[in-house]
Amino acid sequence: MLELFLVMITLTSPVLIIILVRHYFRYKSAANQQLLALQKETNSHTARATQEKLAILVERVIVLEKIVTDSNTTLRQEIKKL
C-alpha cells in the first residue's frame, strides 16, 4: 500500500509542480499589468500637477516682471493684489 502511494506521488508531483508554476506566472503577469496601469495613472496625475504649478509660476513671474518695470503707482497696486 505504501509503495502504491509513493508511486502515485512520484508520478503526479511533476504535473502538480507544472500547474503551480503556471499559476504563479499568470499571477505575476496580472500583477505586473496592474502595476503598470497604476504607474501610468500616477504619471499622468503628476504631469498634470506639474503643468498646473508651472502655469502658476509663469503667471507670478509675469507679475513680478511688471512690478519691476512699471512705475511706483502701479507697483503699489500690484503689491496689494499679491
Image (spheres, grey):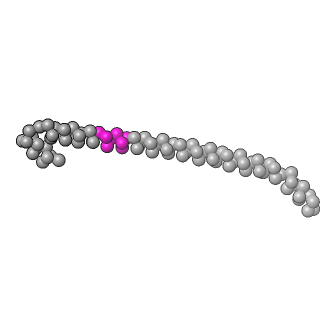
Q: Residue at x 12, y 48 (%)?
A: 80
Rendered position, 70 above or below 21: above
**In screen coordinates, is 52 left or right of 74?**
right
Residue drawn at the location 19% of the way across and 38% of the way down: 65
**Residue shown at the point (53%, 43%) measured from the top left:** 36
Magenta residues, as a range? 48-55
Residue furthest front as drawn: 68
Q: Is residue 63 left or right of 42 when viewed as pictured?
A: left
Q: Predominant secondary structure in magenta?
A: helix
Residue furthest out toward the bottom: 2
Judge left or right: residue 13 versus residue 33.
right
Question: Which quadrant of the figure contains the N terminus?
Answer: bottom right
Q: Residue 49: x and y, percent?
A: 36, 43
| Residue 79 painted magenta | no
Residue at 40% x, 40% y: name it. 47
Which of the two residues, 26 or 82, is positioned nearer the viewer here? Answer: 82
Closer to us: 55 or 37: 55
Q: Position of residue 17 (x, y in %)?
A: 77, 50
The answer to which quarter of the image holds residue 57 is top left
Q: How many marks?
A: 0
Measured as percent of width and height from the top left, residue 82 is found at 17, 47
In the picture provided, is 77 more to the left or to the right than 24?
left
